[in-house]
Amino acid sequence: MEKHIVLLPGDGIGQEVINSAKEVLEAIAEEFHHSFSFEQQEIGGTAIDLYGTPLPEATVEATKKADAVLLGAVGGPKWDNNPSHLRPERGLLGIRKALDLFANLRPVTGFKQLLHASPLKEEIVAGSDLLIVRELTGGLYFGQPSERRDNGNAVVDTLSYTRHEIERIVDKAFKAARVRRGFLTSVDKANVIESSKLWREIVEEKKAEYPDVTVEHALVDSTAMKLITNPTHFDVIVTENLFGDILSDEASVLTGSLGMLPSASLREDDMGLYEPVHGSAPDIAGKGIANPCAMILSSALMLRYSFHLEEEAKLVEEAVQSVLESGAHTGDLQIKGGRLVGTAEMTKLIVDYIKTQHPAKCIQDCYR
Ligand code: NAD
Protein backbone atom coordinates (compact mmCIF):
# COMPACT_ATOMS: atom_id res chain seq x y z
CA MET A 1 0.00 0.00 0.00
CA GLU A 2 1.30 3.49 -0.88
CA LYS A 3 0.41 6.39 1.41
CA HIS A 4 1.57 9.97 1.78
CA ILE A 5 1.70 11.28 5.36
CA VAL A 6 2.17 14.92 6.38
CA LEU A 7 3.99 15.45 9.68
CA LEU A 8 3.18 18.57 11.71
CA PRO A 9 5.52 18.47 14.74
CA GLY A 10 4.31 21.83 16.13
CA ASP A 11 5.90 22.98 19.37
CA GLY A 12 7.66 21.72 22.51
CA ILE A 13 7.71 17.93 22.83
CA GLY A 14 5.66 17.71 19.61
CA GLN A 15 9.02 18.14 17.83
CA GLU A 16 10.40 15.11 19.68
CA VAL A 17 7.55 12.60 19.76
CA ILE A 18 6.65 13.02 16.08
CA ASN A 19 9.99 11.39 15.16
CA SER A 20 9.07 8.41 17.32
CA ALA A 21 5.83 7.90 15.37
CA LYS A 22 7.72 8.24 12.07
CA GLU A 23 10.25 5.57 13.12
CA VAL A 24 7.42 3.22 14.10
CA LEU A 25 5.62 3.77 10.79
CA GLU A 26 8.85 3.17 8.86
CA ALA A 27 9.27 -0.14 10.69
CA ILE A 28 5.66 -1.10 9.90
CA ALA A 29 6.17 -0.18 6.22
CA GLU A 30 9.30 -2.32 6.04
CA GLU A 31 7.77 -5.34 7.76
CA PHE A 32 4.50 -5.32 5.83
CA HIS A 33 5.90 -4.11 2.47
CA HIS A 34 4.04 -0.81 2.37
CA SER A 35 5.42 2.42 0.98
CA PHE A 36 4.85 5.42 3.27
CA SER A 37 6.24 8.79 2.15
CA PHE A 38 6.59 11.66 4.65
CA GLU A 39 6.56 15.42 4.26
CA GLN A 40 7.06 17.88 7.12
CA GLN A 41 5.22 21.19 7.43
CA GLU A 42 4.91 23.76 10.21
CA ILE A 43 2.04 24.68 12.52
CA GLY A 44 1.53 26.55 15.81
CA GLY A 45 4.19 28.69 17.51
CA THR A 46 7.00 27.37 15.30
CA ALA A 47 5.05 28.49 12.22
CA ILE A 48 4.44 31.91 13.82
CA ASP A 49 8.20 32.33 14.35
CA LEU A 50 9.07 31.21 10.81
CA TYR A 51 6.19 32.58 8.72
CA GLY A 52 4.24 34.99 10.94
CA THR A 53 1.11 32.82 11.03
CA PRO A 54 0.09 29.72 13.05
CA LEU A 55 -1.25 28.03 9.90
CA PRO A 56 0.73 28.79 6.73
CA GLU A 57 -1.01 28.24 3.38
CA ALA A 58 1.68 25.66 2.44
CA THR A 59 0.64 23.56 5.46
CA VAL A 60 -3.04 23.64 4.48
CA GLU A 61 -2.23 22.77 0.86
CA ALA A 62 0.06 19.88 1.83
CA THR A 63 -2.44 18.38 4.29
CA LYS A 64 -5.24 18.58 1.72
CA LYS A 65 -3.18 16.38 -0.62
CA ALA A 66 -2.16 13.92 2.13
CA ASP A 67 -3.68 10.52 2.93
CA ALA A 68 -3.31 11.31 6.63
CA VAL A 69 -1.73 13.88 8.97
CA LEU A 70 0.22 13.33 12.19
CA LEU A 71 0.38 16.29 14.58
CA GLY A 72 2.59 16.65 17.68
CA ALA A 73 1.24 19.51 19.81
CA VAL A 74 1.05 23.28 19.68
CA GLY A 75 1.52 26.09 22.19
CA GLY A 76 3.92 27.30 24.83
CA PRO A 77 4.65 30.28 27.10
CA LYS A 78 6.60 32.05 24.35
CA TRP A 79 3.34 32.80 22.50
CA ASP A 80 0.94 33.11 25.48
CA ASN A 81 0.70 36.90 25.25
CA ASN A 82 0.25 37.04 21.48
CA PRO A 83 -2.95 38.60 20.10
CA SER A 84 -5.64 35.98 19.43
CA HIS A 85 -4.98 35.67 15.66
CA LEU A 86 -1.33 34.87 16.46
CA ARG A 87 -2.00 32.16 19.05
CA PRO A 88 -0.65 28.66 18.23
CA GLU A 89 -4.07 27.03 18.99
CA ARG A 90 -5.47 28.98 16.02
CA GLY A 91 -3.41 26.67 13.81
CA LEU A 92 -5.06 23.60 15.30
CA LEU A 93 -8.61 24.93 14.99
CA GLY A 94 -7.84 26.16 11.47
CA ILE A 95 -6.48 22.83 10.22
CA ARG A 96 -9.46 20.90 11.63
CA LYS A 97 -11.80 23.28 9.81
CA ALA A 98 -9.80 23.30 6.55
CA LEU A 99 -9.88 19.50 6.42
CA ASP A 100 -13.56 19.23 7.46
CA LEU A 101 -12.75 16.86 10.33
CA PHE A 102 -16.09 16.19 12.01
CA ALA A 103 -15.47 12.97 13.95
CA ASN A 104 -13.22 12.88 17.00
CA LEU A 105 -12.15 9.46 18.28
CA ARG A 106 -10.56 9.07 21.70
CA PRO A 107 -9.71 5.55 22.86
CA VAL A 108 -9.08 4.95 26.57
CA THR A 109 -7.21 1.81 27.49
CA GLY A 110 -6.38 0.72 31.02
CA PHE A 111 -2.79 -0.52 30.75
CA LYS A 112 -2.24 -3.10 33.50
CA GLN A 113 1.09 -1.63 34.66
CA LEU A 114 -0.43 1.85 35.10
CA LEU A 115 -3.68 1.08 36.90
CA HIS A 116 -2.26 2.20 40.25
CA ALA A 117 -2.05 5.76 38.82
CA SER A 118 -5.82 5.88 38.20
CA PRO A 119 -7.95 8.00 40.56
CA LEU A 120 -10.34 4.99 40.63
CA LYS A 121 -9.85 1.72 42.48
CA GLU A 122 -7.79 -0.71 40.40
CA GLU A 123 -10.56 -3.34 40.42
CA ILE A 124 -13.00 -0.83 38.86
CA VAL A 125 -10.71 0.41 36.09
CA ALA A 126 -8.95 -2.90 35.28
CA GLY A 127 -9.92 -4.13 31.82
CA SER A 128 -11.29 -0.76 30.64
CA ASP A 129 -11.00 -0.43 26.89
CA LEU A 130 -13.39 2.05 25.36
CA LEU A 131 -13.62 4.49 22.48
CA ILE A 132 -15.47 7.81 22.54
CA VAL A 133 -16.70 9.03 19.14
CA ARG A 134 -17.61 12.71 19.42
CA GLU A 135 -19.28 14.92 16.81
CA LEU A 136 -16.90 17.84 16.38
CA THR A 137 -18.38 20.49 14.08
CA GLY A 138 -22.05 20.90 15.04
CA GLY A 139 -24.27 21.41 18.08
CA LEU A 140 -24.13 24.12 20.70
CA TYR A 141 -20.58 25.29 19.89
CA PHE A 142 -21.55 26.10 16.30
CA GLY A 143 -25.12 27.48 16.62
CA GLN A 144 -26.33 30.97 15.69
CA PRO A 145 -24.14 33.64 17.29
CA SER A 146 -25.10 33.77 20.98
CA GLU A 147 -27.47 36.57 21.84
CA ARG A 148 -27.70 38.67 24.99
CA ARG A 149 -31.15 40.08 25.79
CA ASP A 150 -32.76 42.08 28.58
CA ASN A 151 -29.77 44.43 28.95
CA GLY A 152 -27.41 41.48 29.12
CA ASN A 153 -29.40 39.65 31.81
CA ALA A 154 -30.71 36.90 29.54
CA VAL A 155 -28.90 34.84 26.94
CA VAL A 156 -29.73 32.52 24.02
CA ASP A 157 -27.40 29.82 22.67
CA THR A 158 -28.67 27.56 19.90
CA LEU A 159 -28.12 23.84 19.41
CA SER A 160 -28.71 22.68 15.87
CA TYR A 161 -28.03 19.45 13.99
CA THR A 162 -29.03 18.28 10.53
CA ARG A 163 -29.91 14.69 9.64
CA HIS A 164 -26.75 14.52 7.50
CA GLU A 165 -24.52 15.66 10.37
CA ILE A 166 -25.95 13.02 12.70
CA GLU A 167 -25.96 10.22 10.13
CA ARG A 168 -22.30 10.63 9.23
CA ILE A 169 -21.03 10.57 12.84
CA VAL A 170 -23.29 7.66 13.80
CA ASP A 171 -22.05 5.80 10.76
CA LYS A 172 -18.41 6.29 11.80
CA ALA A 173 -19.27 4.96 15.27
CA PHE A 174 -20.98 1.82 13.92
CA LYS A 175 -17.94 1.17 11.72
CA ALA A 176 -15.60 1.63 14.68
CA ALA A 177 -17.71 -0.74 16.83
CA ARG A 178 -17.55 -3.33 14.08
CA VAL A 179 -13.74 -3.61 14.30
CA ARG A 180 -13.86 -3.65 18.12
CA ARG A 181 -16.22 -5.68 20.35
CA GLY A 182 -19.40 -4.74 18.46
CA PHE A 183 -21.18 -2.86 21.28
CA LEU A 184 -22.32 0.73 20.72
CA THR A 185 -23.70 3.08 23.39
CA SER A 186 -25.45 6.09 21.87
CA VAL A 187 -25.54 8.91 24.42
CA ASP A 188 -28.14 11.69 24.35
CA LYS A 189 -30.66 13.56 26.49
CA ALA A 190 -33.73 12.40 24.56
CA ASN A 191 -36.00 12.80 27.60
CA VAL A 192 -35.57 16.60 27.34
CA ILE A 193 -33.84 17.85 24.17
CA GLU A 194 -35.42 17.70 20.70
CA SER A 195 -32.11 17.28 18.82
CA SER A 196 -31.45 14.22 21.00
CA LYS A 197 -34.78 12.74 19.90
CA LEU A 198 -33.74 13.06 16.24
CA TRP A 199 -30.33 11.63 17.18
CA ARG A 200 -32.00 8.58 18.75
CA GLU A 201 -34.31 8.06 15.74
CA ILE A 202 -31.33 8.10 13.36
CA VAL A 203 -29.37 5.60 15.46
CA GLU A 204 -32.44 3.31 15.42
CA GLU A 205 -32.66 3.61 11.61
CA LYS A 206 -28.93 3.03 11.10
CA LYS A 207 -28.72 -0.10 13.19
CA ALA A 208 -30.43 -2.13 10.45
CA GLU A 209 -27.28 -1.57 8.32
CA TYR A 210 -25.07 -3.01 11.08
CA PRO A 211 -26.70 -6.22 12.34
CA ASP A 212 -23.35 -7.29 13.82
CA VAL A 213 -23.37 -4.34 16.27
CA THR A 214 -25.46 -4.34 19.48
CA VAL A 215 -26.84 -0.89 20.33
CA GLU A 216 -27.98 0.66 23.60
CA HIS A 217 -29.27 4.18 24.20
CA ALA A 218 -28.20 5.97 27.36
CA LEU A 219 -28.75 9.39 28.87
CA VAL A 220 -25.69 11.58 29.27
CA ASP A 221 -26.14 12.04 33.04
CA SER A 222 -26.28 8.32 33.80
CA THR A 223 -23.39 7.71 31.37
CA ALA A 224 -21.23 10.20 33.29
CA MET A 225 -21.88 8.15 36.45
CA LYS A 226 -21.37 4.77 34.81
CA LEU A 227 -18.03 5.87 33.32
CA ILE A 228 -16.56 6.04 36.81
CA THR A 229 -18.58 3.27 38.50
CA ASN A 230 -18.42 0.66 35.73
CA PRO A 231 -16.11 1.75 32.86
CA THR A 232 -15.67 -1.80 31.58
CA HIS A 233 -19.36 -1.75 30.55
CA PHE A 234 -18.46 0.36 27.50
CA ASP A 235 -16.98 -0.46 24.12
CA VAL A 236 -17.83 2.43 21.72
CA ILE A 237 -19.71 5.54 22.90
CA VAL A 238 -21.10 7.93 20.27
CA THR A 239 -22.42 11.35 21.16
CA GLU A 240 -22.87 14.95 20.08
CA ASN A 241 -20.30 17.74 20.47
CA LEU A 242 -20.95 19.15 23.97
CA PHE A 243 -21.67 15.80 25.66
CA GLY A 244 -18.62 14.32 23.90
CA ASP A 245 -16.37 17.13 25.04
CA ILE A 246 -17.24 16.49 28.67
CA LEU A 247 -17.37 12.69 28.56
CA SER A 248 -14.07 12.35 26.68
CA ASP A 249 -12.25 14.47 29.26
CA GLU A 250 -13.87 12.50 32.08
CA ALA A 251 -12.85 9.21 30.45
CA SER A 252 -9.30 10.41 29.77
CA VAL A 253 -8.44 10.56 33.47
CA LEU A 254 -9.61 6.98 34.12
CA THR A 255 -6.22 5.54 33.30
CA GLY A 256 -4.25 8.27 35.06
CA SER A 257 -1.69 8.59 32.26
CA LEU A 258 -1.82 11.63 29.96
CA GLY A 259 1.24 10.42 28.06
CA MET A 260 -0.62 7.30 26.88
CA LEU A 261 -3.72 8.85 25.25
CA PRO A 262 -4.01 9.06 21.45
CA SER A 263 -6.74 10.69 19.36
CA ALA A 264 -8.04 10.82 15.79
CA SER A 265 -10.15 13.38 13.92
CA LEU A 266 -11.70 12.05 10.73
CA ARG A 267 -13.26 13.35 7.56
CA GLU A 268 -16.11 11.58 5.74
CA ASP A 269 -13.72 9.73 3.36
CA ASP A 270 -11.63 8.49 6.37
CA MET A 271 -8.76 10.89 5.78
CA GLY A 272 -7.71 11.92 9.28
CA LEU A 273 -5.53 13.97 11.58
CA TYR A 274 -3.94 12.03 14.43
CA GLU A 275 -2.48 13.59 17.57
CA PRO A 276 -1.78 12.84 21.21
CA VAL A 277 -4.27 14.24 23.76
CA HIS A 278 -1.44 15.90 25.71
CA GLY A 279 -0.03 19.36 24.95
CA SER A 280 3.47 20.60 24.13
CA ALA A 281 4.73 20.07 27.73
CA PRO A 282 7.12 23.08 27.74
CA ASP A 283 8.39 22.06 31.20
CA ILE A 284 10.17 19.00 29.74
CA ALA A 285 10.66 20.05 26.10
CA GLY A 286 14.14 19.50 24.64
CA LYS A 287 15.23 17.16 27.44
CA GLY A 288 14.67 13.88 25.57
CA ILE A 289 12.41 12.53 28.32
CA ALA A 290 8.92 12.91 26.79
CA ASN A 291 6.74 9.83 26.65
CA PRO A 292 6.29 9.00 22.93
CA CYS A 293 3.51 6.42 23.51
CA ALA A 294 0.48 8.69 22.94
CA MET A 295 2.00 9.83 19.63
CA ILE A 296 2.91 6.28 18.62
CA LEU A 297 -0.57 5.03 19.57
CA SER A 298 -1.98 7.89 17.44
CA SER A 299 -0.07 6.46 14.48
CA ALA A 300 -1.70 3.08 15.23
CA LEU A 301 -5.10 4.80 14.97
CA MET A 302 -3.98 6.20 11.62
CA LEU A 303 -3.18 2.70 10.36
CA ARG A 304 -6.60 1.48 11.55
CA TYR A 305 -9.01 4.28 10.66
CA SER A 306 -7.45 5.96 7.59
CA PHE A 307 -5.56 3.05 6.00
CA HIS A 308 -7.71 0.13 7.30
CA LEU A 309 -4.57 -1.82 8.23
CA GLU A 310 -5.90 -3.58 11.33
CA GLU A 311 -3.11 -6.12 11.72
CA GLU A 312 -0.47 -3.41 11.53
CA ALA A 313 -2.38 -1.19 14.01
CA LYS A 314 -2.70 -4.08 16.48
CA LEU A 315 1.01 -4.85 16.23
CA VAL A 316 1.90 -1.25 17.17
CA GLU A 317 -0.48 -1.38 20.16
CA GLU A 318 0.86 -4.77 21.20
CA ALA A 319 4.43 -3.40 20.96
CA VAL A 320 3.61 -0.51 23.34
CA GLN A 321 1.87 -2.90 25.76
CA SER A 322 4.76 -5.35 25.66
CA VAL A 323 7.43 -2.69 26.29
CA LEU A 324 5.46 -1.44 29.32
CA GLU A 325 5.16 -5.03 30.56
CA SER A 326 8.95 -5.32 30.33
CA GLY A 327 9.09 -2.48 32.90
CA ALA A 328 10.64 0.15 30.59
CA HIS A 329 8.93 3.52 31.06
CA THR A 330 9.43 7.28 30.76
CA GLY A 331 9.47 9.53 33.83
CA ASP A 332 5.80 10.51 33.68
CA LEU A 333 4.77 6.87 34.31
CA GLN A 334 5.43 5.19 37.58
CA ILE A 335 5.98 1.48 37.17
CA LYS A 336 7.10 -0.24 40.34
CA GLY A 337 10.47 -1.90 39.86
CA GLY A 338 10.62 -0.68 36.27
CA ARG A 339 13.50 0.79 34.28
CA LEU A 340 13.50 4.52 33.49
CA VAL A 341 14.26 5.33 29.83
CA GLY A 342 14.15 8.44 27.61
CA THR A 343 12.14 9.13 24.45
CA ALA A 344 14.73 7.62 22.08
CA GLU A 345 15.15 4.36 24.00
CA MET A 346 11.41 3.90 24.53
CA THR A 347 10.93 4.34 20.78
CA LYS A 348 13.72 1.91 19.95
CA LEU A 349 12.25 -0.76 22.22
CA ILE A 350 8.86 -0.40 20.49
CA VAL A 351 10.45 -0.51 17.01
CA ASP A 352 12.55 -3.55 17.99
CA TYR A 353 9.44 -5.38 19.19
CA ILE A 354 7.71 -4.71 15.84
CA LYS A 355 10.74 -5.95 13.90
CA THR A 356 11.26 -9.09 15.95
CA GLN A 357 7.61 -10.09 16.37
CA HIS A 358 6.36 -9.62 12.86
CA PRO A 359 8.67 -12.02 10.96
CA ALA A 360 7.92 -14.67 13.60
CA LYS A 361 4.19 -14.34 13.00
CA CYS A 362 4.73 -14.39 9.25
CA ILE A 363 6.67 -17.67 9.43
CA GLN A 364 3.84 -19.27 11.46
CA ASP A 365 1.25 -18.01 8.95
CA CYS A 366 3.31 -19.25 5.99
CA TYR A 367 3.47 -22.79 7.37
CA ARG A 368 -0.20 -23.00 8.32
P1 NAD B 1 0.50 19.46 28.73
O1 NAD B 1 -0.28 18.29 28.31
O2 NAD B 1 1.46 20.01 27.74
O3 NAD B 1 1.34 19.10 30.07
C1 NAD B 1 0.73 18.77 31.30
C2 NAD B 1 1.73 17.99 32.17
O4 NAD B 1 1.88 16.68 31.65
C3 NAD B 1 3.12 18.60 32.17
O5 NAD B 1 3.70 18.43 33.43
C4 NAD B 1 3.90 17.79 31.15
O6 NAD B 1 5.29 17.71 31.39
C5 NAD B 1 3.23 16.42 31.27
N1 NAD B 1 3.20 15.72 29.98
C6 NAD B 1 2.34 15.94 28.96
N2 NAD B 1 2.62 15.11 27.94
C7 NAD B 1 3.67 14.37 28.32
C8 NAD B 1 4.43 13.34 27.69
N3 NAD B 1 4.16 12.90 26.43
N4 NAD B 1 5.46 12.81 28.37
C9 NAD B 1 5.77 13.21 29.62
N5 NAD B 1 5.07 14.16 30.27
C10 NAD B 1 4.05 14.75 29.61
O7 NAD B 1 -0.55 20.57 29.18
P2 NAD B 1 -0.29 22.08 29.64
O8 NAD B 1 0.96 22.17 30.44
O9 NAD B 1 -1.57 22.52 30.21
O10 NAD B 1 -0.09 22.88 28.27
C11 NAD B 1 1.19 23.21 27.73
C12 NAD B 1 0.97 23.86 26.36
O11 NAD B 1 0.36 22.91 25.48
C13 NAD B 1 0.01 25.05 26.42
O12 NAD B 1 0.49 26.05 25.55
C14 NAD B 1 -1.31 24.50 25.93
O13 NAD B 1 -2.12 25.47 25.32
C15 NAD B 1 -0.82 23.47 24.92
N6 NAD B 1 -1.76 22.36 24.65
C16 NAD B 1 -1.81 21.93 23.37
C17 NAD B 1 -2.61 20.85 23.04
C18 NAD B 1 -2.61 20.38 21.62
O14 NAD B 1 -1.74 20.75 20.87
N7 NAD B 1 -3.54 19.54 21.23
C19 NAD B 1 -3.36 20.20 24.03
C20 NAD B 1 -3.25 20.65 25.34
C21 NAD B 1 -2.44 21.74 25.66
Image (cartoon, rainbow, N blue to C red):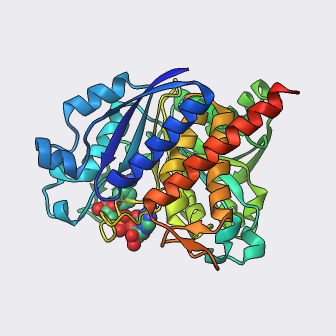
Please give the name of the residue rendered at 60% of the width and 62% of the height, measured from the top-left corner.
251
The answer to whether residue 12 is above or below residue 52 is: below
Is any atom of residue 22 visible in this view?
Answer: yes
Q: Position of residue 119 (x, y in %)?
A: 62, 77
Q: Is residue 113 left or right of residue 133?
A: right
Quarter of the C terminus within the rendering = top right
* Residue 18, x across and y down, in percent: 40, 47
User: Most extreme residue toward the right, as rendered?
Assistant: 368
| x and y percentages locating residue 90 in the rendered image | 26, 47
User: With respect to residue 150, does 22 lie above or below?
Assistant: above
| Relative depth, front residue between 286 and 117 | 286
**Would residue 154 be seen by someone viewing this image from the given angle?**
no
Answer with left or right where residue 272 lies relative to residue 236. Answer: left
Residue at 61% over, 76% down? 117
**Quarter of the image that includes the N terminus:** top right
**Residue at left offset 43%, top offset 39%:** 137
Q: Is residue 69 above or below residue 48?
A: above
Above/below status of 81 relative to 133: below
Q: Is residue 338 left or right of residue 246?
A: right
Q: In which quadrant of this rendering is ligand 1 seen? A: bottom left
The residue at 21%/66% (across/down) is 77
Position of residue 55 measured from the top left corner of the image (x, y, whole percent): 23, 40
Question: Could you say which is closer to the camera, residue 59 or residue 182?
Answer: 59
